[in-house]
Amino acid sequence: MLDERKIKILAAVIHDYIATAEPIGSRTIARKYRIGISPATIRNEMADLEELGYLSQPHTSAGRVPSHKGYRFYVDFLMPVKKLSDTEQALIRRIFNKRVNELEQLVREAARVISTLTSYTTLTIGPQLKTSRLKHINVNRIDETKGLLLMVTNYGTVSHNIIEIPQNLNDSDLVRISNVLNANLQGKTLVEITSDIIDSIKNEMIEYDEILNILLEILLENLDDVDESGNVVSTGSSKMLDYPEFQDVEKAKNFFSLLEQNDLMTKVLKTSMKPDSINITIGSENPFIEFQDFSIVTSNIRVDDKDLGVFGILGPTRMEYSRVVSILEQVTNYLTKTLSTML
């Protein structure tokens, strides 16, 4: 374990390097942090910290920068709790005070505000909707030959489909069809809609066989499409170009190339995630070598044992960890409370 003096010097180097992205020298530490020891003594302590693996020296004549091990010590033992400003808290609350009825829209809004407040890239895996249940089905006439099939799930996902209406059907027929579909399918998942249920619907409304075949096919396809959600969506990716670590053209190109690899991004987020907690993966701790220049802070969203998605904040290892954790905690807490009333 590090002694108190080394801990103070390590914390000072990390705080200054996060703010400046410039190697930190002993004179800077002595002048700004008033630790009560001379620059020469600070220099010796920094050399010891480098030998122990907590700091590194990019060039012989340069100051020191934190290593991934140094950041891990900081996150585990030194990271302060960052209190968000009233303005920041109001911005977060505003999202959840909106009348947003669709889960995916709410997650997108939350990702946008996280990226705005952190100035890093926010990654989301869409709601894991393997338990999507049909909440409401409605068939309405648009004109003499066309109708609109509306399907709403318990997650607020809405599907619209234009359908052909047989000429022999009137508006009361469409009402009856809607009522029977709701009576038989409401509250059911895709898996629970068995062939026996479908056959029962067809037997009950055998005179509507032509339109029923079309409606049931569309409903099952739409519900299956909802269950297939889960692509990684990035928000605020251009913000990374503001950081000196990524102003090199090749690094920037590699970063944007990584964002396009959905399967890899999914693995990275799911590997970094720990259930029911915020997790920080720093640089070389990531098993995927392509991401060892980054840190990733993740949080999964769960309500009533349902996995509703993952947030990940991707940034340089010189990340303002305490601020990121505070923002992610506040957003996920609001999101969880809001979703518990929606579902």
Image (spheres, grey):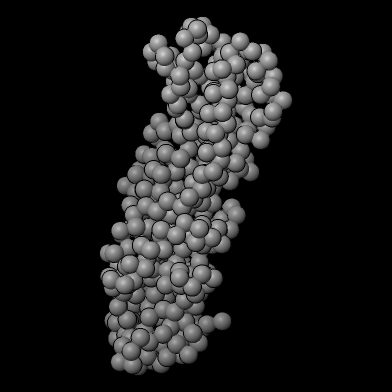
Tell me where residue 47 sits by quadrant: bottom left
Relative image position of residue 155 (x, y in whole percent):
52, 34
In the image, is 25 to the left or to the right of 71?
left
Q: Is residue 273 above or below residue 138?
A: below
Give whichever of 136, 117 is nearer the camera. Answer: 136
Image quadrant containing the C terminus: top right
Residue 94 visible in the shown view: yes
In this rendering, position of residue 77 left or right of residue 323: right
Q: In percent of the image, x 50 and y 87: which residue is there?
A: 52
Q: Is residue 100 above or below residue 316?
A: above
Q: How many marks?
A: 0
Q: Is residue 86 visible?
A: no
* Quarter in which the N terminus is drawn: bottom right
Along the line of sight, which residue is nearer the eye, 278 or 164? 164
Q: Is residue 192 left or right of residue 223?
A: right
Residue in the image at 42% along x and 68% along y: 294
What residue appears at the point 50 percent right and 66 percent down from the top-left corner?
281
Q: Quadrant of residue 213?
A: top right
x, y percent for residue 115: 36, 53
Q: Nearer the viewer, residue 89 or 133?
A: 133
Residue 125 % position (x, y): 49, 50
**Residue visible at 32% across and 81% down?**
23
- The percent position of residue 3, horizontal first and vertical second, equals 51, 83
Look at the picture and state if 256 lies above or below 171.
Answer: below
